[in-house]
Amino acid sequence: MSSDVRSSTRHADGLDTGSPAPPAAVKAENVTRSFRVGSQEVHALQGLSLEVPSGAFVALMGRSGSGKTTLLNMIGALDQPTTGEVWVNGRPLSRLSDNQLTRLRREEYGFVFQSFALLPILSCAENVELPLRIAGGVSAKERRQRVEDALALVGLEQWADHRPYEMSGGQQQRVAIARALVSRPRILIGDEPTGELDTKTGQKIMRLLREVVNREGLTLVMATHDPTVEEYADDVYHLQDGQLIDHFTRSPGTAPLGGSA
Ligand SMILES: Nc1ncnc2c1ncn2[C@@H]1O[C@H](COP(=O)(O)OP(=O)(O)OP(=O)(O)O)[C@@H](O)[C@H]1O
Ligand SMILES: [Mg+2]
């Protein structure tokens, strides 16, 4: 982490097990990203470093335009830094070929966005199955099982045959989360996944994401404007003008919902 970030630990009674830390799921070092807009240069990220431990729930907060989506795009291998490097499970993304990046996105990542982007003519189960059909290489039987598992994870077993328009916003976002989980990713990336939901439903989705992280041992990095994320996240980073200005971290053994983080 860069030295100018204020870092603090809540619940400072954490247990020190003495075991070596597992490798970071994601590591960003001195990442910058600039965009040319006409004759102007926009510096969306200005030398940002962070480490996301494997199995952690990490939240990115900050005002509109502070660089959250730009950073998620770097971490998710959807865009490349202007300078600096991003490592995923120890692999520097700049050294991966386009094919390797595509495989990484398809096999190791799940993405959840603000808009659920479900296909209205498909049932809930068919929407969840879609990424597996597109990727290919998974038998129909295996696909059925994975869809069932993913729907069970988000508590929608009974809704498999329903269409999105028959479901509430919160349920639709749960379908979108199941769709992100169906490929059994190691890293889940969320860009304001509760942004279109009312406060109460947003809380439920946040809680569900925390449960999924605990149960599946996934790593979650999500951008949000909802400050209650601090109740659920292990690490909360605050961005301002493309830089990290604050970092709160939770001690091991104090994860919410009795988790394993
Ligand atoms: N493709 C692009 N071309 C030009 N400028 C861009 C592009 N993408 C992002 N920016 C600029 O980079 C800055 C950071 O944008 P970003 O979308 O990362 O912010 P954000 O924190 O996600 O905001 P929000 O909370 O509104 O989603 C902004 O000034 C934005 O205008
Ligand atoms: Mg954004």
Image (cartoon, rainbow, N blue to C red):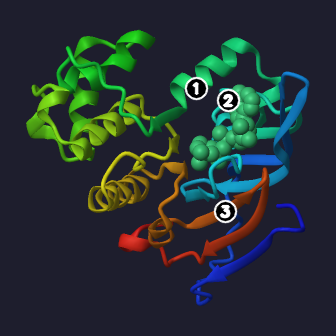
Sequence-wise, the earlier of marks 2 and 3 is 2
In the picture shown, does residue 167 fall above or below 107?
A: below
Residue 226 position, x and y percent, is: 47, 61
Residue 181 relative to residue 6: left or right: left
| Kind of residue at disc 3 | Tyr
Instruction: Locate residue 231: give its quadrant.
Output: bottom left
Ligand 1 found in image quarter: top right
| Kind of residue at disc 1 | Arg
Per the rendering, the mark at residue 237 is: 3
Residue 201 visible in rendering: yes
The answer to the question of whether label 1 and label 2 lie on touching residues, with beta carbons closer than 8 A, is yes
- Residue that badge 1 annotates: 105
Q: Quadrant of the N terminus?
A: bottom right
Q: Secondary structure at mark 3?
A: strand
Residue 106 relative to residue 12: left or right: left
* Crowd around label 2: few <14 · some 14–19 · many ≥20 (10 Å): many
Per the rendering, the mark at residue 77 is: 2
Residue 189 relative to residue 80: left or right: left
In the picture shown, does residue 112 fall above or below 94?
A: below
Residue 251 position, x and y percent, is: 59, 78
Q: Nearer the viewer, mark 1 or mark 3?
A: 3
The answer to the question of whether label 2 and label 3 lie on touching residues, with beta carbons closer than 8 A, is no
